[in-house]
């Protein structure tokens, strides 16, 4: 029933399916599409009340959809894999009016920043009139482009270290990563279980907010996902939070008095000056709306990226162990290297052939950091730093982290860096949200990222998104206009005034409802400002 | 990774699964819940047509091969081979046992035996992409019981880790186990002489248990001809516990005794589905040697022998490996830390892989699974409801009931623990019948034990033909045996009649609870002869045997030292032949005869001899 569509030649592996149909504008954001008849069939199955809320949904191809659709994870191992079951999140969204339109392209198993490491070729995105192909961001690049292009109202992605927020920033849409444990991961093919979350993308905050908060996705525990918060824990978490009760009146939300923290450590050297300016402009806009802007310090930020690239590959190594050419992928017959006898390693060749370069790189990384010699120096240290990252956040947020013991919540002022200003004798100002860019640069040219040789350069794109992932916090990227800056850059960019970057808002755990409301309000102001 | 599976596989396929009757024993001792293999050990029913070709004879072949290879060496008996002068052996053991639970460890799929292959498989069992583990708390009950029986501290919080290695029988590419934070630690087992420890270890020895951990079993591999392997995922994810001892054993027999004892303890608390000989239990042993005059305090380099599946294999493999290491060291060589294998009945261990081939398991806390929190209340509830452990029970049988150690041990071990339960059932019935009349000297207990063990044992060639159930009933109903014993105890029937009755009950010739009626109907009640009638028979027998009476006279006059009991019993035999046997009690006959000889025949003989002189 499902037709494969639009594969580009670039990077296509030999066992990828043939090109069946030219995809519009060759963006290559879908791996498979649901034919129109099948979409109509889905619509007929919806009863009246659901049909009234009908919306189109694109799904990242590492989230299981039941056969006949495939769930490839953009991996050569799974190009023909049909899941016998459907992910909980899909079932939940169907019940809320979703009509599945297709499965979107991604970096293999969610590992990448530009959606170029795919068995189905890279995703591209061209905004503006210059016609230059840009990176769609990764790893949920296909989902972001599907939303940006209007192929779907809402798209599902997965966010492990920024995989929803980064593509949203690069493609000018909204990308939301909920608190860890809120949305079920059952049916999401894991990359790094302790970091993976299901994320949502849309052109505006509204539809996301309606689904997660208004339609009560936030409250649904899934017994099939051991990391899905129990109903009791959800109630406890929501008790001290606003926005989960009676639906708020849109007008009721005021940004007046809300405190936004500007993390000093995020003002890095590599930050594009245009983004820095836009960030400052957004802060100024908020101040104008009555919000308070407070500088805060998150001292562990610098170690967070390395921590992420120790923990995530370690978990990836484990999760990908099952792809061995015996059950998934193909095994070359009659080859002596495949022998399980003395000296032979049955799986090595299969895995060598079956995985893409980026996945192999991360498996090797994980194999090293988990090895008995390196474990103590890498994996265990990384876990310790991860706690520090979370403590940083807990210290700056006004709200307490409901999943942390009180004893861990007391902080010694002497631990604070000197640069942090004290609000009063009790310490520095505590904030409601953190305000920072989603990525240090605008969407790079696809050509540049394809020729990039250093993996570390790509990893740099995650620097602002990884800390919230490590701490399991809700975060959202909304488009913010980037004003054409001075001189040559603006001239070269041509239609630069059309460019947007991602503005990221991070909230305390389970403060998703308020985060979405604030992001909605701010987003409207930002885009309003652009229009004027 | 090369692993021997065939032997274990054969056992696994050929044995039935456990009944799931209640784990807690209602009566004093706790053997009711023990393995129910006897009940369900059947080959696959006709409905289960799937009969994959297997090689149960491979084991025997390996054995023969190994013997041949050894060149018919005269083997020393193990009991004489517990020590090597100048050397100290050190052994630590890891024992894997299948927990007795209805579901797998991380999925609600049923645990099963001999069911249609791949019929109990959940998404997670085969590690389908996107599936997640769901810990089944049921597994905690047998696991905690096992740990309590092994004297461990139950940890309030424990966690699961992933142990990575590639093997086709493990779909996820890792096994979920408890490496860093196991649920039970710091236990011990006391082994006594009666457990079969080496004589060198004296009356008893205490072996420390380092930890007990929960983990997943792997899929079952079925080897077909032509290097084809079939996989049955019914077994994948079935809960196991691994018991890890400290390296505190120094004699091979003691190591084997430890494994046997662990099995007995696990069975007694209903923690484990089947015994070692049935494939539900397997052991890995770590063996090292050092010179007795070694003052460094360090143990020698150890080797690990994997997958030992019988008690004898444990002892034999340790002896063989010890001797190999000593020979190597005495020849100036070095022991390599490596993994070795053992074929049943062999004489030498063989190298499986060296340290360079050793897998780095890359243990990692499972990021999907939260900690296991075991409530103190659960632990104390299980501790109090667990019933009596085998050692306490043995002590009771020996010191309170007066059984011999040998009989007590047989009673406890026969029929996988069902025999002792039968004994308790019979004893209950018997005491009910005796009422206030029961003997203060426990002679009725000994009588019951004797019949439950020895007389019952004479009925069949193999005890399984008794059809003993785990709840302690068999073809001879406990009430019927109690009725027979009651009549013996009251001297209402003779032992011979009692034995005939037992046979009749066994053959089903006597209705259930119809023992007394049968005795009545066939006039088998014991109506004993009067003293005078005994005396008359004694007289008729002794008349022709005056020569024999001479023996008694010689004893009386001090010419021989020992009383001629044999002669006396010979005469009693003649009495039983001469008189109506069903009315005679040999003891009474003996008593009367003795008096007649003393009082009548010796004086008569003396008189005769005096007359002759």
Image (cartoon, coloured by chain):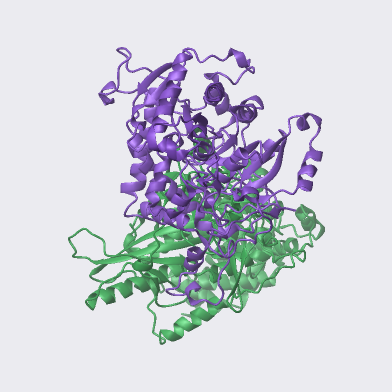
- Res. A131 in view: yes
Figure quadrant of residue A368: bottom left
Left or right: B305 in relation to B50: left
Which of the pair B7/A84 is nearer the observer? Answer: A84
Q: Nearer the viewer, residue A309 or A449?
A: A449
Across and down, in percent, residue B307 comes to 47, 66
Residue A216 shown left or right of residue B284 in the figure: right
| Chain identifier of the green chain | B
Q: Quadrant of residue B35?
A: bottom right
The hue of chain A in the figure is purple
Up/down of A331 relative to A96, above or below: below
**In the image, residue B590 lies at what x, y percent?**
58, 64
Q: How many marks?
A: 0
The foreground one among A45 and B519 is A45
Q: In the rendering, at what x and y percent does residue A356 appear?
A: 49, 58
Left or right placement of residue A299 versus residue A249 in this view = left
Is A446 or A14 nearer to us in this picture? Answer: A446
**Residue B265 visible:** no
The residue located at (34%, 27%) in the rendering is A264
């Amino acid at each position: 029933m499902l037709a494969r569509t639009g594969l580009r030649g670039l990077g296509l592996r030999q066992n990828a399916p043939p090109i069946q149909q030219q995809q519009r504008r060759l963006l290559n954001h879908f791996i498979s599409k649901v034919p129109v008849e099948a979409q109509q069939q889905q619509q007929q199955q919806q009863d009246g009340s659901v049909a009234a809320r009908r919306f189109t949904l694109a799904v990242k191809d590492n989230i299981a959809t039941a056969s006949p659709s495939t769930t490839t994870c953009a991996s050569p191992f799974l190009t023909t894999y049909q899941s016998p079951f459907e992910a909980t999140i899909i079932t939940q969204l169907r019940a809320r009016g979703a009509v599945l339109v297709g499965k979107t392209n991604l970096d293999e198993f969610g590992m990448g920043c530009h959606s170029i490491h795919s068995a189905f070729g890279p995703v591209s995105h061209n905004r503006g009139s210059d016609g230059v192909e840009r990176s769609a961001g990764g790893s949920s690049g296909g989902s972001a482009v599907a939303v940006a292009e209007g192929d779907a109202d809402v798209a599902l992605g997965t966010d492990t270290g920024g995989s929803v927020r980064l593509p949203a920033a690069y493609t000018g849409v909204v990308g939301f990563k909920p608190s860890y444990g809120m949305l079920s991961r059952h049916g999401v093919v894991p990359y790094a279980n302790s970091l993976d979350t299901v994320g949502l993308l849309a052109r505006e905050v509204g539809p996301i907010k309606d689904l997660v908060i208004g339609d009560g996705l936030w409250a649904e525990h899934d017994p099939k996902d051991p990391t899905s918060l129990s109903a009791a824990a959800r109630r406890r978490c929501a008790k001290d939070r606003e926005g989960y009760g009676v639906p708020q009146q849109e007008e009721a939300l005021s940004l007046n008095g809300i405190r936004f923290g500007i993390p000093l450590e995020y003002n890095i050297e590599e930050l594009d000056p245009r983004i820095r300016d836009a960030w400052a402009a957004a802060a100024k806009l908020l101040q104008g709306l009555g919000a308070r802007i407070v500088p805060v310090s998150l001292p562990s930020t610098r170690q967070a990226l390395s921590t992420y690239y120790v923990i995530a590959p370690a978990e990836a190594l484990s999760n990908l162990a099952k792809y061995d050419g015996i059950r998934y992928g193909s095994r070359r017959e009659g080859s002596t290297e495949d022998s399980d006898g003395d000296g032979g390693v049955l799986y090595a060749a299969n895995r060598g052939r079956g995985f893409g370069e980026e996945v192999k790189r991360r498996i090797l990384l994980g194999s090293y950091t988990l090895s008995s010699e390196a474990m103590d120096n890498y994996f265990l240290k990384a876990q310790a730093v991860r706690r520090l990252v979370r403590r940083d956040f807990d210290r700056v947020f006004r709200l307490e982290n409901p999943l942390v013991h009180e004893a861990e919540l007391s902080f010694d002022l002497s631990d604070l860096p000197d640069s942090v200003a004290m609000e009063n004798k009790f310490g520095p100002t505590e904030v409601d949200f953190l305000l920072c860019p989603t990525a240090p640069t605008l969407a790079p040219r696809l050509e540049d990222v394809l020729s990039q040789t250093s993996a570390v350069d790509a990893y740099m794109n995650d620097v602002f998104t990884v800390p919230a992932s490590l701490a399991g916090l809700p975060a959202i990227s909304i488009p913010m206009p980037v004003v054409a800056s001075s001189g040559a850059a603006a001239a070269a960019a041509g239609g630069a005034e059309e460019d947007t970057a991602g503005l990221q808002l991070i909230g305390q755990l389970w403060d998703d409802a308020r985060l979405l409301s604030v992001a909605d309000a701010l987003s409207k102001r930002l885009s309003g400002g652009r229009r004027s | 990774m090369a692993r021997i599976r065939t032997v274990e596989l054969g056992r696994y396929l050929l044995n039935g699964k456990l009944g799931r009757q209640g784990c807690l024993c209602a009566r004093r001792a706790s053997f009711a819940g023990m393995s129910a293999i006897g009940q369900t050990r059947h080959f696959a029913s006709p409905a289960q047509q799937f009969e994959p070709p297997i090689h149960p004879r491979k084991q025997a072949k390996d054995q023969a091969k190994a013997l041949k290879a050894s060149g018919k060496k005269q083997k020393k008996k193990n009991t004489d081979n517990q020590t090597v002068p100048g050397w100290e052996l050190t052994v630590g053991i890891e024992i894997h046992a299948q927990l007795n639970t209805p579901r797998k460890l991380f999925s609600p799929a049923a645990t099963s035996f001999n069911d249609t292959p791949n019929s109990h498989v959940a998404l997670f069992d085969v590690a389908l992409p996107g599936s997640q583990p769901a810990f089944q708390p049921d597994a905690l009950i047998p696991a905690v019981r096992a740990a309590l029986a092994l004297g461990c501290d139950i940890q309030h919080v424990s966690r699961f880790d992933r142990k990575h290695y590639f093997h086709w029988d493990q779909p996820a590419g890792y096994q979920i186990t408890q490496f860093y934070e196991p649920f039970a630690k710091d236990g011990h087992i006391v082994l006594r002489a009666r457990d079969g420890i080496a004589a060198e270890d004296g009356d008893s020895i205490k072996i420390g248990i380092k930890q007990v951990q929960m983990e997943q079993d792997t899929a079952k591999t079925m080897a077909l001809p032509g290097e084809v392997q079939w996989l049955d995922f019914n077994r994948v994810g079935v809960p196991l516990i691994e018991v890890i001892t400290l390296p505190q054993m120094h004699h091979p027999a003691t190591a084997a005794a430890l494994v046997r004892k662990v099995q007995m303890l696990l069975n007694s608390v209903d923690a484990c589905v089947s015994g070692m000989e049935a494939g539900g239990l397997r052991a890995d042993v770590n063996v090292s040697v050092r010179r007795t005059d070694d003052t460094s305090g360090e143990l020698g380099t150890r080797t690990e022998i994997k997958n030992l599946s019988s008690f004898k294999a444990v002892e034999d493999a340790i002896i063989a490996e010890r001797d190999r290491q000593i020979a190597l060291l005495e020849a100036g060589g070095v022991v390599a830390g490596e993994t070795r294998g053992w074929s049943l009945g062999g004489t030498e261990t063989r190298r499986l892989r060296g340290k360079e081939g050793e897998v780095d398991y890359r243990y990692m806390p499972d990021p999907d699974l939260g900690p296991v929190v075991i409530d103190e209340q659960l632990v104390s509830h299980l501790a109090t409801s667990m019933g009596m452990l085998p050692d306490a029970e043995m002590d009771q049988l020996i010191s309170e009931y007066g059984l011999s150690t040998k009989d007590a041990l047989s009673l406890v071990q026969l029929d996988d623990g069902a025999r002792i339960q039968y004994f308790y059932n019979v004893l209950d019935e018997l005491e009910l019948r005796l009422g206030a009349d029961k003997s203060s000297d426990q002679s009725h207990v000994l009588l019951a034990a004797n019949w439950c063990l020895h007389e019952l044992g004479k009925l069949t060639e193999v005890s399984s033909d008794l059809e003993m159930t785990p709840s302690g009933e068999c073809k001879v109903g406990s009430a019927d045996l109690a009725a027979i014993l009651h009549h013996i105890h009251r001297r209402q029937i003779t032992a011979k009649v009692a034995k005939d009755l037992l046979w009749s009950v066994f053959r089903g010739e006597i209705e259930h609870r119809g023992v007394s009626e049968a005795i009545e109907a066939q006039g088998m009640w014991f109506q004993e002869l009067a003293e005078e009638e005994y005396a008359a028979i004694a007289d008729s027998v002794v008349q022709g045997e005056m020569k024999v009476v001479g023996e008694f006279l010689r004893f009386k006059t001090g010419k021989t030292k020992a009383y001629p009991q044999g002669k006396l019993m010979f005469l009693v035999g003649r009495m039983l032949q001469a008189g109506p046997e069903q009315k005679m009690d040999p003891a009474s006959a003996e008593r009367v005869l003795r008096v007649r000889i003393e009082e009548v025949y010796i004086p008569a003989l003396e008189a005769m001899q005096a007359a002759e002189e």
